[in-house]
Image (cartoon, grey):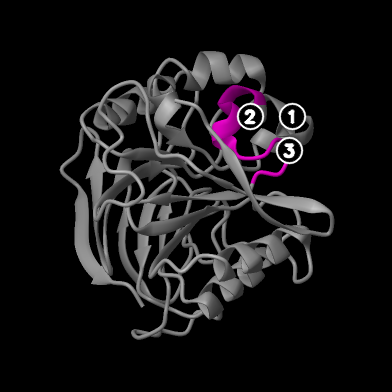
Amino acid sequence: MMIVWRRVGGVGGIALLMCACGGSGVGPSPGPGPGHSLGVLVEAGDIGMCGSTGPESTARLLDDIDGTVFTAGDNAYFQGTAQQFRDCYDPSWGRHKLRTRPAPGNHEYESAGAAPYFAYFGANAGPPGLGYYSFNVGEWHIVSLNSSVSMSTGSAQQAWLRDDLASHNASCVAAIWHHPLFSIGPNGPMPETRELWRTLYDAGADVIINGHDHFYARFARQTPDGVADTSRGIRQFVVGTGGAELVGFTRAAPNVETRLSAFGVLKLTLRPGSYDWQFIAANSSQSDSGSDVCR
């Protein structure tokens, strides 16, 4: 499938681009594209670790799930080199590469400018060198962000996000990036992401998905300051379960509803005005599922 990036404006001389495409790839069909009432997004972060059985076990889950595959960063350990993408990511999740929309993590930036990441995923990773872009799944607007570059108020990325959200009238919005604002694991929360959260909260976004800590955790709807908010809050998922070695729960955080330690993927069934979530574990009976409406 040809990937086309459509110019939708500009900030500070940087073109603002949106992918005018649906998903496609090896394995199951990508499911309904823009203009259809139902979409599926399936994802995890922290994936390609050579020597771990995790990447293949989660890739086998993808084999049986239609939809757009998304990664939440740290795709190839430990330095995100071309060899590590070839040897540690491609043999498993690579068979779904053509229907994958990735986000970069900190390990990608162990290689200068995350160049092997952009080379491996090509146009599916958005405009080369930026690491942030947007696309649609069903009637949802999906924003992929880059937590390894500046996210502060007035940064190019924050300005792009604000303008991208303002230029789309989707009733439901999800955002995906690597470092979580809220976490209960050893890698911990990243306060620098709060301005991205605040921009999304002010625009009425519904779901944020992160990785970085290698477990699954679901939070209740909350504000960017961690205050429970059942009417306008955003629900955050941490899904660092793609295949890298799992870690334990080491700290407390408000509004945690569920936590699981297992390799697996998060499947979101995206409906007009609502969504279903399901965490599907590989080789484990652990699971989590539920539904919610958009704000």
Q: CA distance from mark 1 to mark 3?
A: 12 Å
Which numbered dot is residue 117? Answer: 2
Q: Does the stretch in magenta take in 120? A: yes
Residue underneath mark 3: 129
Q: Is residue 63 left or right of residue 13?
A: left
| Element class at badge 2 | helix
Residues under numbered marks 3 and 2 in contact, where contact means CB atoms less than 8 Å apart: no
Q: Name the residue rendered at 67%, 39% in the picture.
A: 127
**Vertical relation: 267 (above or below) 162:** above
| Element class at badge 1 | loop
| Element class at badge 3 | loop
Circle 1 residues within 10 Å: few <14, some 14–19, many ≥20: some
Which numbered dot is residue 246? Answer: none
User: Can the viewer see residue 39?
Assistant: yes
Q: On the image, which quarter does residue 218 sit in?
A: bottom left
Q: Does the stretch in magenta take in 213? A: no
Identify the mark nearer the N-term, 2 or 1.
1
Residues under numbered marks 2 and 1 in contact, where contact means CB atoms less than 8 Å apart: yes
Q: CA distance from mark 3 to mark 2?
A: 9 Å
Of labels 1 and 3, the one closer to you = 3
Q: Nearer the viewer, residue 18 or 173?
A: 18
In the rendered structure, which segment of residues is drawn in magenta?
A: 119-131
Residue 219: x and y in percent read: 37, 68
Q: Name which residue type carries label 1.
A: Ser
